[in-house]
Amino acid sequence: MNFWQSLYDGFHTNIIVSDRWFLLLKGLGITLEISLFAVIIGVVLGVILALAKISKSRNFIIVFFRWISNVFIDVIRGTPSFVQLLIINFVVFASVDIDKTIVASIAFGLNSAAYIAEIIRAGIQSINKGQTEAGRSLGLSEGLTMRYIILPQAIKNILPALGNEFIVLVKETSVAGYIGAYELTKASQIITSRTYNSFWPLFAIAVIYFVVVKLLSVALAALENKLGKSDAR
């Protein structure tokens, strides 16, 4: 009884008293907000980077942009996302008064763009070259063939990988608190500073992260199953 009573007392003191659960709920909302905006930035920029990387054009501007894309992807994939977050906050936006949630969204969005670019590039190159030839034989330009024939098929193939990238982003945002962004980890630190107990706040956010990731994984598995059935038709 003493063991269960102590567990209850710890949970009640750290999570229930003074509505501290609301701090965790608010942190969860901001965590999901950062992740959502980051993946939107990542997808938009990732598509541009992927198209630039696979372009065969010899136009000077395209060649230069292709070089920039390759350098960007190499640098972003070769450095820790936490270091990138610190650089963007304490260097790029050092003299700008901007919401830390926005800073974190931009930082994780740029990081995600490099990985999404490679996912999209692989998805486009996985489409049979005959599809491109069929589009061109119908009189479509290279751009229209890519837009109406290649990209729709590629996107269908890479949706599961994009879902996994979103799951990774949700977990990566746990370091956003180091620049002052209020997310789950920051919420747990605030609770710890008030109760001088780190077990329950950390255990609580671990459970929350697990539940969120599990729900996203189930949704992703359902999506993959649905896509698999449509391919079998």
Image: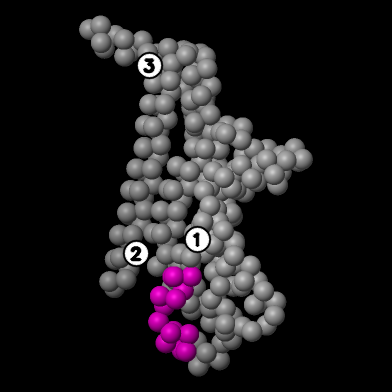
Residue 187 is tagged as none
Identify the residue shown where x is 51% and y is 56%: 78
Q: Are marks 1 and 3 in contact (CB under 8 Å)?
A: no
Q: How is the image coloured?
A: one colour
Around disc 1, counting alpha carbons within 10 Å, would you say few (fewer than 14), some (14 to 19), or many (20 or more)? many
Q: List the residue tagged with mark 1.
A: 116
Around disc 3, counting alpha carbons within 10 Å, would you say few (fewer than 14), some (14 to 19), or many (20 or more)? some
Judging from the image, what secondary structure is the residue with disc 3 in? helix
Which amino acid type is marked by label 3? Phe
Identify the residue shown where x is 53% and y is 52%: 79
Residue 175: image location, x then y, percent: 52, 37
Around disc 2, counting alpha carbons within 10 Å, would you say few (fewer than 14), some (14 to 19), or many (20 or more)? some
Whichever of callouts 3 and 2 sits on the residue coming sooner in the sequence is: 3
208 drawn magenta:
no
Res 182 quadrant in image? top right
Whichever of callouts 1 and 3 sits on the residue coming sooner in the sequence is: 3
Res 74 quadrant in image? bottom right
Residue at the extreme right? 95
What is the magenta range? 121-134
Q: Is residue 31 above or below residue 65?
A: above
Q: List the residue tagged with mark 2.
A: 227
In the figure, is residue 135 to the left or right of 63?
Answer: left
- Quarter of the picture holding the N terminus: top left
Whichever of callouts 1 and 2 sits on the residue coming sooner in the sequence is: 1
Residue 216: image location, x then y, percent: 39, 47
In the figure, is residue 163 to the left or right of 74?
Answer: left
Query: What whole-number distance in Å separates the C-alpha atoms at marks 3 and 2?
Result: 43 Å
What kind of secondary structure does the magenta stretch mostly adopt? Answer: helix
Which amino acid type is marked by label 1? Ile
Residue 93: image location, x then y, percent: 71, 43
Which amino acid type is marked by label 2? Leu
